[in-house]
Image (tube, rainbow, N blue to C red):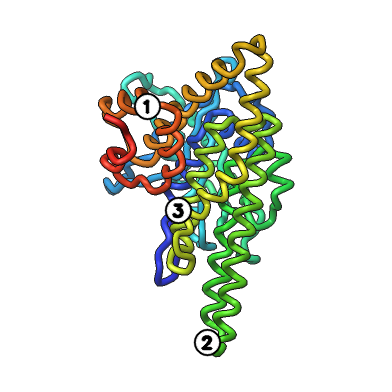
């Protein structure tokens, strides 16, 4: 999936990561997109996304999930799209069929048995603003022998139609980073305008400030959710990581060090609240004499866990020797690593922070 501009933007990894932050947040997304009311501890499973087609080529769906309730399984397919492609409904039918027959046990099909396959519930999330996109994509299938007309319908979800209040109400925190995508389109339109250099420079400066304000508002929403405990710090940090990565992908050519700036904004807004929350929780656990030690021990353990999660998310599997070295560090070193987490591009970059 990508863009048709000269500069290609790849959203796939970010979108996949957002829907893998935690089962709880993914459940909230399913409830919102498919109008369900699953409890946040509902059993959920990420399913295979790759399907071999009849021509031996591979089709890769964006997100395929399974919900199990009372030993009954229901599949959900979420596809992300940038452009309004008229053939998309056909591809959705193809995906739906592949998902429906996946894991079908051909060896245990009885002779003359009439098979039933259940298509997944599907939704298409459109990322780039386009007023021509309908609320539903539809296609009618005319069956030759039964004379039935089967109407295949896939609803759409258009991110620009929903403001932060909607996402907050639906607990769709994993969608908040996607709010910045349509700012890219504004920049492309700005570049096409026939303006002198002074006018264009002024507008681009205003545009950069707008980007930062939107990002600040997203971080504030995450902070508010953290305060009321609708997010935990690990979830919040993962969302921030994807926000920084997406901002870098979209705007790094125009806003230097945008990824680092997102990190700085996040630290300024979140760190005081994380400390206050840790202090409050620590005070509830013990007598005054043990508060400081308890908080410090819990804080260091939480920092180690969060750093390992973020590094794994960014770099892949972390070698055991580095995990052991991270766990052996004191609070000061861990704080330095956390402060520079967005600058670590390779596992060996850790060597300049870690004590031997």
Query: Where is residue 123 shown, x and y percent of the image?
Result: 57, 45
Spatial separation of the CA atoms under disc 3 and disc 2: 32 Å
Circle 1 SS class? loop
Q: Nearer the viewer, residue 290 or 297?
A: 290
At a point 56% along the width and 56% down the height, the residue shown is 127
* Dot 2 and dot 1 residues touching (CB under 8 Å): no
Q: Earlier in the sequence, mark 1 or mark 3?
A: 3
Query: Where is residue 61 shown, x and y percent of the image?
Result: 43, 44
At a point 70% along the width and 42% down the height, the residue shown is 168
State left or right for residue 114 relative to residue 150: left
Spatial separation of the CA atoms under disc 2 and disc 1: 51 Å
> Quadrant location of the C terminus?
top left
The residue that disc 1 covers is 329
Residue 289 appears in which quarter of the rendering? Answer: top right
Q: Nearer the viewer, residue 117 or 296?
A: 296
At a point 48% along the width and 24% down the height, the residue shown is 300
Rendered image: mark on residue 11:
3
Is the residue marked by circle 2 packed among few (<14), some (14-19), or many (20+) residues within 10 Å? few
Q: Nearer the viewer, residue 172 or 232?
A: 232
Q: Nearer the viewer, residue 322 or 178?
A: 322
Rendered image: mark on residue 25:
none
Q: How many marks?
A: 3
Residue 171 visible in rendering? yes
Circle 3 SS class? loop
Considering every residue shown, the one lying at the far top of the view is 287
In this rendering, the label closer to the viewer, 3 or 2: 2
Query: Where is residue 339 shown, x and y percent of the image?
Result: 46, 42
The residue that disc 2 covers is 197
Q: Earlier in the sequence, mark 3 or mark 2?
A: 3
Check the image and report above or below for 136 versus 63. Answer: below
Q: Earlier in the sequence, mark 2 or mark 1?
A: 2
């Amino acid at each position: 999936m990508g863009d048709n501009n000269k500069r290609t933007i790849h959203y796939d990894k970010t979108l996949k990561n957002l829907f893998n932050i935690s089962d709880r947040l993914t459940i909230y997304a399913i409830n919102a997109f498919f109008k369900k009311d699953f409890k946040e501890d509902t059993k959920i499973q990420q399913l295979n996304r790759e399907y071999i087609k009849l021509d031996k080529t591979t089709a890769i769906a964006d997100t395929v999930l399974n919900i199990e309730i009372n030993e009954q399984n229901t599949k959900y397919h979420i596809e992300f799209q940038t452009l309004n492609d008229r053939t998309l409904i056909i591809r959705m039918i193809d995906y739906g069929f592949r998902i429906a027959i996946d894991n079908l046990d051909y060896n245990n099909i009885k002779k003359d048995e009439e098979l039933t396959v259940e298509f997944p519930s599907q939704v298409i999330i459109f990322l780039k603003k386009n007023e021509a996109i309908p609320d539903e994509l539809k296609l009618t299938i005319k069956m030759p022998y039964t004379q039935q007309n089967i109407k295949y319908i896939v609803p759409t979800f258009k991110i620009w139609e929903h403001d932060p209040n909607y996402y907050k109400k639906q607990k769709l925190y994993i969608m908040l980073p996607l709010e910045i995508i349509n700012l890219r389109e504004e920049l492309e339109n700005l570049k096409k305008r026939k303006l002198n250099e002074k006018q264009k420079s002024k507008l681009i400066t205003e545009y950069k400030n707008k980007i930062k304000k939107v990002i600040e508002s997203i971080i504030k929403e995450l902070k508010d959710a953290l305060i009321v405990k609708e997010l935990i710090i690990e979830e919040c940090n993962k969302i921030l990581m994807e926000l920084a990565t997406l901002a870098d992908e979209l705007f790094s050519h125009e806003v230097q060090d945008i990824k680092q700036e997102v990190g700085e904004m996040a630290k300024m807004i979140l760190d005081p609240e994380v400390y206050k929350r840790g202090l409050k929780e620590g005070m509830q656990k013990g007598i005054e004499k043990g508060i400081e030690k308890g908080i410090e021990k819990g804080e260091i353990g939480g920092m180690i866990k969060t750093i390992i999660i973020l590094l794994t998310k960014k770099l892949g599997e972390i070698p055991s020797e580095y995990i052991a070295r991270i766990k052996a560090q004191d609070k000061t070193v861990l704080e330095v690593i956390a402060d520079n987490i967005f600058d670590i591009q390779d596992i060996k970059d850790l060597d300049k922070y870690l004590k031997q």
